[in-house]
Amino acid sequence: MADRLKGRVAVVTGAANGIGEGIARMFRAEGATVIGIDREGPDMACDLTDEASTAALFAQIGRRHGLIDVLVNAAAFAVFAWIEDMSYADWKRTLTGELDIVFLPTRAAWPLLKESGSASVINFASANARHALEGSPALAHCAGKGGVQAMTRQLAMEGALHGIRANTISPGFIRTAATARHLAADPAFEQQVLSKNMLKRLGEPEDIAWCATWLASTEARYVTGADIPIDAGATAW
C-alpha cells in the first residue's frame, strides 16, 4: 500500500545513513513529512547527546509543525571492546551513545507527541540485548541496548494515557556502512553471524524500515510495549 503514513509528521534520528536513512526514505515514500536529524543533517543537524541543543532543536520543530506523530530514535554509537580492554571512559561513552541519545530526544519530543493523540515512538534494542554473539566484543553495546528495551516498556506505560505507543525493534546483523567495517576486519565474522541465523543471509536497512513503517502507522494502533525481533530467527533458537 502507498500513503500508509500520509499526513503524519515523523522525526527520524540517525537519518544520514544506515537503518535511519532507510527508514526516512521509506517513510517519505509512504507519504510522511519527515524531519531527518543527524550530526550533519540531512534536514536538521544536532548533537543529540547535548541537552540544550536537543531541546532547542525540538522547540524549533514544534514551532514549525505543532506536533510530532512519529519519533524514530535510530541514532546510536558504541565502542566495541572486550571487558579487559574497555576503559571506563569508553564504557560511559557507549552508554551515552545508546541511552542518552534516546532519552534526550524523547523527553524533548514528549509534549509534541502528546499533541498528536496517536503518536508512535520507535526505539532500537538489538539481538544483542537477548543473546551474546560469540566473537563479538559487545559488552557495553549489549548493556546499552538492554537498557533501551527496558526504557521503552516504561515509555509505553507513561505514554498510554496520552495516546503514545512505544515499541522497540531488535535488529539482527544489518549490512550498513558501519557494520561493513566489522566484516572487513574479520572475514570469519560473517559466518559466525550466519551460524546463528535461521535464514542464511544478512539483513538490509529496508528489512527494518518495513517494520518501522507498520509501527508508525495506524495499522499498529493496538501495539505498545512490544519488542519485535527482525533477525532472521537468530534469537528464536
Image (spheres, rainbow, N blue to C red):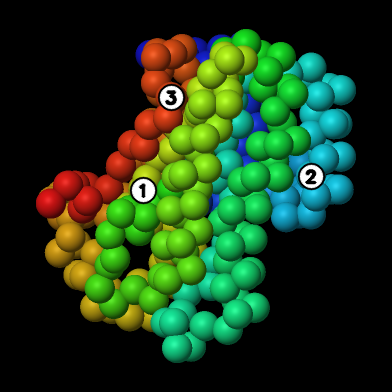
Relative horizontal placement of residue 97, taking residue 125 as reference (left or right) = right
Type of residue at label 1? Pro
Q: Is residue 215 left or right of residue 131?
A: right
Mark 3 secondary-structure assignment: loop
Q: CA distance from mark 3 to mark 2?
A: 25 Å
* Residue identified by numbered label 1: 171
Quadrant where the image shows the N terminus: top left
Instruction: Give the distance between the C-alpha atoms of the residues marked 2 and 1, in whole angstroms.
Output: 26 Å
Q: Position of residue 184 (x, y in %)?
A: 38, 76
Residue under numbered circle 2: 54
Report the side of 81 relative to 170 (left or right). right
What's the amino acid at mark 2? Thr
Relative placement, left or right, of 203 versus 148 is left
Instruction: Compare residues 131 and 78 and report the one nearer the observer.
Output: 131
Q: Earlier in the sequence, mark 3 or mark 2?
A: 2
Disc 2 is placed on an element classified as: helix
Label 3 crowd (10 A; few <14 / some 14-19 / many >=20): many
Q: Secondary structure at mark 1?
A: strand
Rendered image quadrant of residue 181: bottom left
Residue 164 at x, y percent in the picture: 57, 20
Which residue is pictured at 58% across the width and 15% down the height? 161
Task: Look at mark 3 in the image and give the residue it sits on.
Answer: 224
Image mark for residue 70: none
